[in-house]
Image (cartoon, helix red, strand yellow):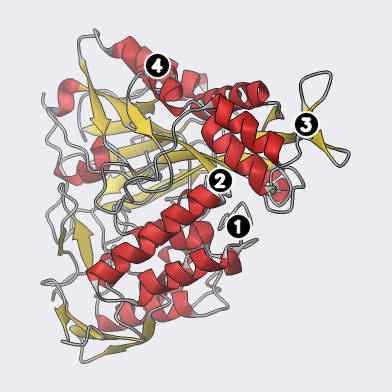
């Protein structure tokens, strides 16, 4: 996990094992809609791997859209194009790129019946920008100088600099001032009992088990036909697949090796979503071995990425050389790294890392060894970690894989490597800034590797602050080329997300997805538009 996924969400985002009782499993269509099956209410139950820490957008929930409970000023359609949501149209942007004006829908109400207005937009953005608010994504709104209401239906954002992707930031959900503004933003009841304008209303959140929703009958976009929707939190991939096959679930996200087991099943359909979701190994700057540039460069070419794509992902993905996929317009051509064990050994030899009798290298009395942590129950991370350790061993680097929860892993991130994930399809600033900016090292799951590269810092600021597309492309090319010279992470693969869903919901669609899969993404990204088949 990286900044994007673990903090939010959406990005990310911690998970615990689903532990539904046998009684609940045997009673489809329970009172909160937590079980599948046809009949009144058209319930849908899907299995996901992670749950959020909070359901408050003020703390980061739903910041990239599709929150179900809330709406943003804008939203992303199936082609990842911005469309109006709580705003009536895309913003009017001044010629200098410093002013964004949004006209708001009239007549929209929050789920408690209170009216939505400009004051709620102002409250939401100002609260997130307040340093007292525990929102790890605050830097994403760094460009905002002020946000003001002009009457009840107009909001004006003034920026410090012409931040090119600002409109994409305004998919962020809007919270009601009358509810969230009357309590502690970090610990109040709103964090677990939210009120929004979205198509669904939260009915129950059983931590570690499920999030249950009911359709908002007064939703401004029209009442959803799926009246009850439940997200079952099932951390373990194998358990998720078993419960899907047993009929407890209507759909689930699954790793490729488990999804293929449903390929010939009648009554289900498999959906593959193209993503920006990568798996990477953090190489902490404060670790004497992982922080050594020669070790980093050697690992970067010792790893066999294509073998991981073929054997772990069953071809459902691509080799990753950085946070940007190779087929993106933002990818820097020529930064691909070829698997070359001989080159890896030479890098280590030249740097003074000499093999010992056991084949493991050492330098100045320091053995080339360090631990690599991955999330318990996540088979994809486990398989990537094991393959990475195996490739490293061939070059003379001893990596010990360890499984743990994020509560166990997070305190160790400054010194120990982690099999992490991240990725955002919106704009390169969205993921790269929090992943690589040196000033964010140690800030939760931002810059998990404590990466410190002045050239990268400068390029990230240039890419963020320039309104010129060519200048921005040059800046992000610089970032990617610097990661070749000194990779603070070993990027492994970009993973396509696979979902298996019962076909009673008809033919569904997916978006290009971020790392934050399952909760806001998946074929249920637009569940409010589903029409179940009888």
Identify the residue at horizontal 76%, vertical 39% (top origin). Answer: 352
Give the label, 1 or 4, closer to the camera. Answer: 1
> CB under 8 Å between callouts 4 and 2?
no
Q: Is residue 300 rendered to the left or right of residue 275?
A: right
Label 3 belongs to which residue?
Answer: 354
Label 1 belongs to which residue?
Answer: 451
CA gap, disc 3 to disc 1?
A: 26 Å
CA gap, disc 2 to disc 3?
A: 23 Å
Give the label, 4 or 2, closer to the camera. Answer: 2
The earlier-in-sequence mark between 3 and 1 is 3
Give the label, 2 or 3, closer to the camera. Answer: 3
The earlier-in-sequence mark between 2 and 1 is 1
Identify the residue at horizontal 23%, vertical 53% (top origin). Answer: 199
Label 2 belongs to which residue?
Answer: 489
> CB under 8 Å between callouts 1 and 4?
no
The earlier-in-sequence mark between 4 and 3 is 4
Q: Is residue 205 visible?
A: yes
Look at the image and tell me in which quarter the C terminus lies: top left
Q: Nearer the viewer, residue 225 or 354?
A: 354
The earlier-in-sequence mark between 1 and 4 is 4
Label 4 residue SS: helix
Q: Position of residue 127 (x, y in %)?
A: 45, 78
> CB under 8 Å between callouts 2 and 1?
yes
Label 4 belongs to which residue?
Answer: 258
């Amino acid at each position: 996990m990286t900044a994007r996924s673990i903090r939010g969400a959406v990005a990310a985002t911690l998970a615990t094992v689903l532990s539904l009782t046998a009684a609940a499993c045997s009673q489809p269509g329970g009172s909160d809609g937590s079980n599948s099956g046809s009949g009144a209410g058209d319930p849908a139950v899907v299995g996901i791997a992670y749950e959020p820490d909070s359901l408050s957008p003020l703390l980061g929930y739903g910041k990239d859209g599709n929150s179900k409970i809330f709406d943003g000023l804008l939203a992303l359609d199936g082609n990842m194009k911005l469309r109006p949501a709580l705003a009536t149209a895309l913003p009017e942007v001044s010629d200098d790129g410093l002013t964004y004006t949004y006209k708001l829908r009239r007549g929209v109400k929050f789920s408690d019946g209170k009216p939505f207005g400009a004051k709620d937009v102002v409250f939401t953005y100002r609260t997130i920008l307040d340093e007292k608010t525990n929102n790890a994504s605050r830097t994403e709104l760094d460009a905002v100088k002020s946000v003001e209401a002009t009457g009840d239906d107009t909001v004006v954002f003034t920026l410090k600099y012409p931040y090119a992707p600002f409109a994409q930031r305004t998919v962020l959900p809007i919270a009601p001032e009358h509810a969230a503004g009357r309590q502690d933003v970090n610990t109040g009841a709103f964090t677990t009992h939210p009120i929004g304008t979205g198509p669904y209303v939260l009915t129950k959140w059983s931590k570690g088990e499920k999030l249950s929703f009911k359709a908002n009958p007064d939703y401004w976009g029209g009442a959803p036909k799926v009246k009850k929707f439940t997200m079952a939190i099932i951390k373990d991939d194998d358990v998720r697949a078993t419960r899907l096959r047993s009929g407890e679930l209507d759909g689930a996200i699954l790793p490729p090796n488990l999804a293929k087991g449903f390929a010939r099943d009648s009554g289900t359909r498999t959906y593959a979503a193209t993503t920006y979701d990568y798996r990477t190994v953090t190489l902490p700057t404060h670790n004497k071995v992982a922080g050594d540039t020669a070790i980093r460069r050697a690992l970067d070419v010792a790893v066999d990425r294509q073998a991981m794509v073929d054997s772990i992902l069953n071809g459902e993905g691509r080799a990753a050389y950085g946070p940007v996929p190779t087929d993106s317009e933002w990818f820097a051509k020529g930064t691909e790294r070829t698997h070359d064990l001989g080159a890896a050994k030479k890098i280590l030899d030249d740097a003074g890392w000499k093999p010992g009798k056991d084949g493991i290298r050492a330098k100045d009395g320091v053995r080339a060894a360090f631990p690599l942590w991955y999330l318990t129950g996540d088979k994809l991370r486990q398989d990537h970690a094991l393959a990475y350790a195996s490739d490293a061993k061939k070059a003379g680097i001893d990596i010990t894989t360890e499984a743990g929860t994020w509560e166990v892993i997070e305190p160790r991130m400054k010194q120990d490597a982690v099999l992490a994930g991240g990725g955002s399809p919106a704009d390169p600033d969205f993921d790269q800034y929090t992943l690589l900016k040196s000033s964010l090292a140690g800030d939760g799951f931002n810059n998990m590797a404590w990466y410190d590269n002045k050239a990268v810092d400068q390029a990230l600021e240039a890419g963020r602050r320039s309104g010129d597309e060519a200048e921005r492309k040059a800046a992000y090319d610089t970032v990617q080329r610097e990661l070749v010279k000194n990779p603070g992470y070993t990027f492994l693969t970009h993973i396509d997300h696979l979902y298996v869903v019962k076909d009673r919901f008809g033919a569904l669609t997916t978006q290009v997805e971020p790392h934050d899969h399952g909760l806001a993404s998946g074929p249920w990204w637009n569940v409010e538009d589903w029409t179940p088949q009888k």
